[in-house]
Image: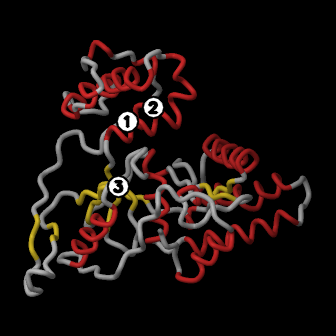
């Protein structure tokens, strides 16, 4: 059973902040984010704006007003207490009925309820019903696939600095350079990289180390470690051919993508990527010309509750910086 989404209950960051919503079900099950009302299928990679992408998918699906209302409802209900205390009431009224409705097997229901209670008790995050979770799909058929990408070296450094170094760095002397030298061969051995893909990046050579399968030490890394460095493509994507839109004059012409397998959304050029995406969606066969909400600022954290709720309720969605 996919993991349910999590939403902060106690301290509420601004709706534009990536920590506003944690929804890993799509990415962890190898699926795409497919908002029903926008013909896109978002392919997300860990450490490549994944939390911002989840929040953006919720914005595209107009889920934020419901999230804010759910938080208010649950907070008011829990403030009143009840038989057995807050956790018992949260479990009975918010979690168990969803498992019963879905007809989950006892072991799956137990895992889901236990994890939801843990997230609630330890991190003040609430497990959301499926109606408030971003929609996943497997193939993205009939949709424009949008692949979010980030500098590979920036992804590796973000994962190492934010998690692997502080928690496991003592297992591997040599710092970040040694980590890169070991983790890429391990990912290749696990089938998460195309053969030679890591060598093509040139990152290890740039760091002054020789890349080879002989450097692989799979015992250092868990599957989740390797998933954080897995590439968006196992082989180079097909070239995306630009087409100049006619009838607007040379100054007003812009590039649009046609006959592409995927549209590349670069986190190093969010503004340009948004422009290319909106142009591509407005052309046949999509003909979806409505403006899209701004992509959430990956660096925006914190903010008052009033900011989040005002943004969600005022415009039917959140607005990124």
Query: Could you give the CA–CA distance between mark 2 and mark 1, rounded to whole angstroms?
Result: 7 Å
Q: Position of residue 143 (x, y in %)?
A: 27, 66
Q: Residue at x 76, y 62 (%)?
A: 93
Q: Is residue 310 above or below residue 6?
A: below
Residue, disc 3: 267
Q: Quadrant of residue 256?
A: bottom left
- Can you name the residue that lies furthest to the top here? 214
State the residue lying farthest toward the right. Answer: 83
Residue under label 2: 225
Q: Are marks 3 and 2 in contact (CB under 8 Å)?
A: no
Q: Picture coordinates of residue 133 (x, y %)?
A: 53, 62
Q: Earlier in the sequence, mark 3 or mark 2?
A: 2
Question: Which picture quadrant has residue 100?
Answer: bottom right
Percent position of residue 278, x then y? 28, 73
Q: Could you give the CA–CA distance between mark 3 and mark 2, rounded to whole angstroms?
A: 21 Å
Residue drawn at (38%, 15%) of the image: 217
Dot 2 falls on a residue whose secondary structure is helix
Q: Could you tell me if the residues under marks 2 and 1 are in contact, i.e. CB atoms within 8 Å?
A: yes
- Classify 10 Å Cα crowding around label 3: few (below 14), some (14-19), many (20 and above): some
SS class of the residue under badge 1? Answer: helix
Task: Tell me the number on the disc at residue 256.
Answer: none
What whole-number distance in Å separates the C-alpha atoms at marks 3 and 1? Answer: 16 Å
Crowding around mark 2 (Cα neighbors within 10 Å: few <14, some 14 to 19, many 20+) is some
Dot 3: element: loop
Q: Which residue is mark 1?
A: 229
Quarter of the image where one finds residue 205: top left
**Viewer can see residue 139:** no
């Amino acid at each position: 059973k996919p993991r349910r989404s999590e939403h902060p209950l106690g301290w509420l960051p601004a709706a534009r902040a990536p920590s506003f919503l944690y929804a890993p079900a799509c990415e962890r099950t190898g699926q795409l984010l497919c908002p029903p009302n926008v013909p896109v299928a978002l392919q997300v990679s860990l450490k490549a704006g994944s939390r911002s992408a989840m929040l953006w998918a919720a914005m595209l699906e107009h889920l934020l007003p419901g999230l804010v209302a759910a938080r208010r409802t649950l907070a008011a209900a829990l403030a009143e207490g009840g038989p057995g205390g807050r956790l018992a009431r949260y479990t009975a009224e918010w979690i168990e009925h969803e498992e019963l409705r879905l007809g989950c097997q006892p072991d799956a229901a137990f895992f889901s309820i236990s994890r939801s209670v843990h997230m609630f008790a330890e991190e003040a995050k609430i497990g959301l019903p499926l109606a408030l979770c971003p929609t996943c799909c497997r193939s993205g058929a009939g949709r424009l696939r949008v692949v979010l990408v980030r500098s590979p070296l920036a992804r590796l450094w973000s994962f190492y600095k934010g998690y692997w170094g502080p928690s496991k760095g003592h297992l591997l002397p040599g710092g970040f350079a040694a980590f890169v030298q070991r983790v890429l061969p391990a990912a290749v051995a696990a089938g998460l990289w195309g053969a030679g893909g890591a060598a093509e990046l040139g990152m290890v050579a740039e760091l002054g180390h020789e890349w080879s399968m002989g450097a692989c030490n799979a015992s250092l890394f868990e599957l989740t470690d390797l998933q954080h460095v897995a590439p968006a493509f196992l082989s180079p994507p097909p070239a995306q051919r630009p087409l100049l839109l006619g009838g607007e004059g040379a100054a007003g012409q812009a590039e649009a993508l046609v006959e592409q397998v995927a549209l590349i959304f670069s986190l190093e050029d969010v503004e340009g990527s948004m422009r290319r995406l909106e142009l591509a969606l407005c052309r046949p066969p999509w003909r979806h010309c409505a403006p899209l909400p701004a992509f959430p600022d990956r660096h925006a954290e914190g903010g008052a509750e009033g900011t989040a709720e005002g943004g969600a309720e005022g415009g039917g969605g959140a607005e990124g910086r």
